Every structure is written in structure tokens, then in C-alpha cells.
Image: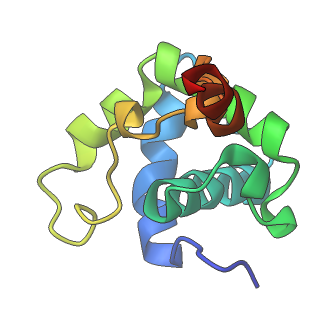
Amino acid sequence: MLPLTLSDEQWQKMLPILQAHPNAYVGQEHECRRFLSAVLWMARSGAQWRLLPKEYGYWNTIYRRFARWSEQGIFHELHQELADDADMEHLLIDSTIIRAHPCAAGARKKVAARKRKH
């Protein structure tokens, strides 16, 4: 069992929206459901992508699919379609809230910054 997973009811509400979206590749439904559960885990944990539990799949594959879906507006459409559903609003995320870790953005390492001060 995954640490965080979509309920059957939640998944059944999301699936038709994803299937109707021209850019959303659903493929095997259980794999798509696992992908969305991974994205929710990331949003709730605030962890680095590399710390994604292995049960969700390879972190880089999940990240690349997340980035692709974000660019194509799939999460935005999900949000628009499900925003009025009180049972779903706690699941909805804005794809812009998952941020890169500072080291991924070119931030200096603390050790290097300390050495420069001396």
C-alpha cells in the first residue's frame, strides 16, 4: 500500500477529466493513479523529488511527467473541474507550489558561502 493514495471515489472523479484532456496520457489506469498519488505526496511532504518513496516509482520519471502535465495545463484543468467539489478540494494543488530545492536553483552551498566570508 502506498503511503498516500487516492480513494476509489476520488479517482473515479478525476479519471474522466484526464481521459477527455487531449494532452493527458492516462495509459494503464493504476499507473496514472499511482503517479497522481506521488504528486500529492510531494505536495504534502515538501520533500525533494529524490526523496519520493520508491513505492510510487522512479522519482525522475514522476518528476518529468509532472513537469510535462504542468506545462500542458492538465493540473490547471483538473483544478478548474474539481474546485467546486467539497470532497476534492483538499486534494487539489496548484502545480506552481511544488518548488525546486535551493541546490537545484543554483544556490551556493553553505560550506562555500562560509569560506568566502573569511
Of 101 and 108, nearer the camera is: 108
* Residue at 86% in and 64% down: 54
Task: Name the residue rendered at 56%, 55% in the picture.
Answer: 42
Q: Position of residue 4 (x, y in %)?
A: 59, 75
| Residue 108, above or below 56 | above
Q: Position of residue 78 (x, y in %)?
A: 35, 39
Whether residue 106 sits left or right of residue 8 in the image: it is right
Which residue is the extreme one toward the front? 118
Q: Residue at x 69, y 46 (%)?
A: 49
On the rendered image, what quadrant is the N terminus found in?
Answer: bottom right
Work out which quarter of the rendered image holds the C terminus and state it: top right
Left or right: 19 in relation to 85: right
Residue 66 % position (x, y): 61, 33
Tell me which residue sits at (61%, 33%) in the image.
114
Q: Work out whether 37 lies above or below 73.
A: below
Q: How many marks?
A: 0
Residue 62 in the figure: left or right of residue 108: right
Residue 94 appears in the rendering: yes
Does any portion of residue 24 appear in the rendered image? no
Query: Residue extending furthest bottom?
Result: 1
Please identify the quarter of the rendering in which residue 94 is found.
top left
The x, y position of residue 38, in whole percent, is 64, 57
> Measured along the vertical axis of the image, is residue 114 above or below residue 22?
below
Depth order, front residue of 21/108: 108
The colouring scheme, among rainbow, by chain, secondary structure or one colour, is rainbow
